[in-house]
Every structure is written in C-alpha cells, then in structure tokens.
Image: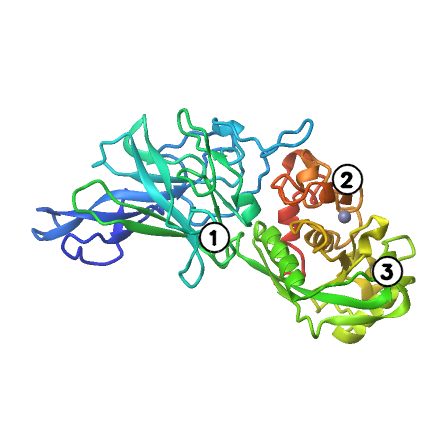
Amino acid sequence: MAYFLKNQTAKGKRPVFLRGSNGNKGAIVGTASLTTTAGTTTHGVMLCPCSVVGYSSPTTYTVDNTNPVLSYVRFGLWDNAFTTTGTATVLNGNSESGNFVGSDSRRFYIRIYDPSATTSTVTVDWYTQSSTGVVDDDGKGPNHTGVDTITLTQSPSNPGLYVSKALMLVADEVDNAQATNTGLSGGSDAAEGAADHRLRRAALGDTMCYAYTPAVTSSGKQTFTEPIFGPAGSPDVVKNLTVQFVKATGGLHNANTVNQTIVNNMAAHVKARYAVAGINVTCKYTDAVDSINVPPSIDLANVIHDSAAPSTGDEAVMIQLLRAKYGAYTTANTTVYVIVIGGFDIRGRSGESYPAYIAGTYPNAVNCCFVTQQNTRPGNIATEPHEIGHVLLERVTADGGPDGMGHYEGLSQEQNLMCAGAGDIATDPNSDTQSKRLWNDPAHNDGVHDYQINYMRLSPLLH
Ligand SMILES: [Zn+2]
C-alpha cells in the first residue's frame, strides 16, 4: 500500500492526514528514524488507514481488507427492508442478511487498520454535518447531547483490521427514529440516541464524518469526512429540481387553511424523498404572493385526471389561472407547479398530476400537480412527492410501470413512493413502512421505469 503525505512534514508527533493511492485515508500517529533513501531524518509513520468501504457483492455480508473503498456515500434505499407477506414490518434481525441496514443496496462500512490496537473492538464517533460545519445529526437523537459511537470488531482473518456492521444514512427523522439491531454478536435493538444505532440523518449538501483515536500512546482523535453523493462528472452527481407551490383560494369546497408553515412542511417532505435520488429540490412559496384566486363556480374538489382532462373542467380553469400568473408552458420552463387545495380529498382523491406525455393535447397542464393540503392528516404523508414522481417518470408516454400510469407494482409496493393507492398512503401515516421509498428494482423491471431513481435522474426537468 502506498501513501502520500498531504502535509509534507510530520510536524513532530502530531498526526498528519494522509490519503492513500487506493482511496484509504489515515493518520500519522507516531514517528520513527529511518535510514533508507529517505535519509536519516524523522519521518511520519503511517499506522492507521481509515476508510468507508462498500460490499464486495450485494449478498456478501462479511467485510475484510478486500472491500472497495468508497469516495462518497449515499442515502439508504430500504430496498430489502420489509417483510413481503401480511402487514409489512421492518426486517431488523441480528444477522446482516436479515436486517434492513445490513441488506440495503447502499449500505457501507467503516474500516480501520490499527496494528497497535489489542482490544477485540474499537469505537468511532459517527455523525453528519451541514455545509457550514454545524453538526446535523450526532446520533444522539433530537436533543443533540454529544456524538454517539459505532463499534468496530476485529476481523478474525486480518489482525489489526476493525470493521463496523453495515451503516446507512436516512433523509428524515421518522426513518432516523427506527431502532436498529446492533448486528454485533448477541446484539439487540439500539434506539436512536444509543451507541451502535446504525442510522444517521442527513440532507443533500451535508458531509458524513467519523472520528477515531488510534491506540498508540498520546495519539489524538482523527476526524475523516466523506461527501454525500458524488462529485461533478460522476454518475452520482447531485441534480437540481425547482418546485413552485401555489395556494388555491376561493372556489367551491375550499377548506383551505394553507399557510407558510404548512407549505414549508410539505416542501421538507419533498426534499427528503428526493434526496435519496440525489435530486436537490428547491421549493418556492411565499404565502402572501403565490396564490391563485378561483371563481366561486369552480369546484376545487373536482380535479381529476380523466380522459377529457385537463382541457375542460374545473382543473382547466385553475391551470389557466396558474399560467396567467407564472407564464405559459414551454419546454425551457423546468419548474414543477404544485397547486395546494384544502378539501381536495373529500371525494377520496388526494393528488393529480399532468406529466409531459399530455403535451400534445393540453400543453399548459404539463408539469402541473394538484395536491390536498397536508395539515389535516399526519404530516408525513407522501402525496406531493408522489405526484412530482409522476411528472419525473412519465415524460414520453403514460406507460411508466406495469399499470401504465407510472405506478410501482413490484415487491413491497405499498412502501414505494409510486404505490398506486392513495388509501395505502393515507392509512399508514408517520411510519417508516409508509409509501415513501424510491428504488431501482431489477427483479420487477419493465425496461426502464422500475429503475425509478435511475430513470428519474434522466428527466430534462433536472438541472
Ligand atoms: Zn399516482
């Protein structure tokens, strides 16, 4: 293994950060006098390569010195997370293959090589921090009382090599509150805020951090960082989407109490859902400005994506008002508009959307969505990100997904954001088993659309 000094001198016995030619990071934790071609001066001695690594294959759950080093991490997908018979529950067993973190397709591990360590385990601090350097999730739960730790266990085949169990980033507090089995020998559930809870919440733009104190005497704690999603030019670069929320006022059946707080909560939910796809959503809404006033004869609860829609009917009037305010549809306009209606759901619907495939019949409706306001239901229901999902998926035809409407029908469909039934969304609120996941499903692939994340990331609305 070759290592290169990031700083050219060892600065006495102070640790110096290193990055190896294979992506490992590490620290100088001591000094030694060498008599090689480097000369008889004091040089830093590299002792502790520290890395975040991926799996060697999706169904391999052991970690050793052969696992690939990752240059960035991503949010977990919960794509192997649920029981598939009866009421879905989160798989949270002690074995990695039977655990939602241990089997996630985006799981990662922290790996440290410390030949000075003689214990069977070592610990690292693990947390996320914002782009301004403020700790985002310290693992200690909502009170943020310190940084919590993860246990790394010595590899039986590689003395001095310590590896964590699988770890995962999540995008919201509901997910973060899910207890995780520690995965350690004889381990049981660790709640959020306890050591060896295997989740940390993050947002796009955050950095993941871990810190380790090498075993050698007088070593200081070393902190290492990993980007979340890939750098410019990488297939996992962060993409951007703009969503404009608009309040509907007036009209029939208007139970509208939409305000800035309600829309901010809806926007936060949209941002969290699309963070897992590496899509950074900018949500626009100013309560005093972003509204359309609907004539009294227009029924706000009568929006429906029927065969005639949206060239006629109540929704057409609202779309005309929206376009008069925000401009006509053009392919250069990449904004998705979400009209928020109070009382929209009195007829059992909670959202409708008009993806690009309808442009030939009624272009003004393209990229427009109608959703019911979300303050009268538990606040984590996924209607608005679901409707935006239709806009991102159904670009050319309506045939996204097996039902021909962009809906997902593979295993654990009720946990998927593009689940067809609003009823499923409504009856399973505020849970990590609700209809809010996006994933790429090779077992239920209709060609492109069930690779939901990959296909969404190709949308021309992203920039
Ligand atoms: Zn739908």
User: Which mark is nearer the camera, 2 or 1?
Assistant: 1
- Using the numbered discs, state the Cα–Cα distance from disc 1 to disc 3 in whole angstroms: 44 Å
Q: Is residue 426 above or below residue 315?
A: above
Contact (Cβ within 8 Å) of mark 1 with mark 3: no
Identify the disc placed on residue 250.
none
Name which of mark 1 and mark 3 comes first in the sequence. Answer: 1
**Residue at 58 percent of width and 39 percent of height:** 78
Label 2 Cα neighbours within 10 Å, binned few <14 / some 14-19 / many ≥20: some
46 horizontally vs 123: left or right: left
Q: Residue 316 location in percent, x, y?
A: 87, 64
Contact (Cβ within 8 Å) of mark 2 with mark 1: no
**Image quarter of residue 402:** top right
336 horizontally vs 251: left or right: left
User: Which mark is nearer the camera, 2 or 3?
Assistant: 3
- For mark 3, give the secondary structure: loop
Please tell me which residue lies in front, 331 or 284: 284
**Three-letter code, disc 1:** Ile
**Residue at 53 percent of width and 27 percent of height:** 98
Q: Which residue is mark 2?
A: 402
Q: Residue 239 location in percent, x, y?
A: 58, 59
Q: Is residue 38 visible?
A: no
Name which of mark 2 and mark 3 comes first in the sequence. Answer: 3
Protein image colouring = rainbow
Label 1 Cα neighbours within 10 Å, binned few <14 / some 14-19 / many ≥20: many
Q: Quarter holding the N terminus? A: top left
**Three-letter code, disc 2:** Pro
**Residue at 47 percent of width and 38 percent of height:** 191
Q: Residue 428 location in percent, x, y?
A: 69, 41
Q: Which residue is mark 1?
A: 228
Q: Which residue is mark 3?
A: 253
- For mark 1, give the secondary structure: loop
- For mark 2, give the secondary structure: loop
